[in-house]
Amino acid sequence: MLPALSLFAQADTRSFAERYGPAIGAPVPSFTAVDQTGASRTLSSLAGPKGTWLLFFRSADW
């Protein structure tokens, strides 16, 4: 006899940010990324005295 399978999957009620990103106000791990000119940038090299605000934008031509 086969084991019983659940037919009802639980919906994930977390927001997109909760599932795929750090919590609001939480520190993010250090990273290095390439900017639009091809230069490597680290998080610490971009941070100012009040912190850093990053926007990741996926363009339509990717």
Image (tube, grey):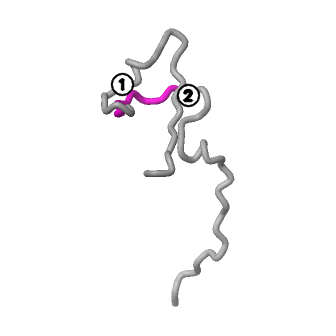
Q: Is residue 12 above or below residue 8?
A: above
Q: Residues within 10 Å of mark 1 (few under 14, many from 20)?
A: few
Q: Which residue is mark 1?
A: 42
Residue at 58% from the left image edge and 78% from the top image edge: 5
Q: x and y percent of residue 29 in the render?
A: 42, 30
Number of labelled discs? Answer: 2
Residue at 54% from the left image edge and 36% from the top image edge: 22
Closest to the observer: 22 or 41? 41
Q: Which mark is residue 57?
A: none
Q: Is residue 52 above or below residue 37?
A: above
Q: Nearer the viewer, mark 1 or mark 2?
A: 1
Q: Is residue 50 above or below residue 11?
A: above
Q: Which residue is mark 2?
A: 26
In this rendering, would 33 be left or right of 1?
Answer: left
Region of the chain picked out in magenta, as a range: 27-34
Closest to the observer: 44 or 22? 44
Residue at 51% from the left image edge and 51% from the top image edge: 60
Q: Are marks 1 and 2 in contact (CB under 8 Å)?
A: no
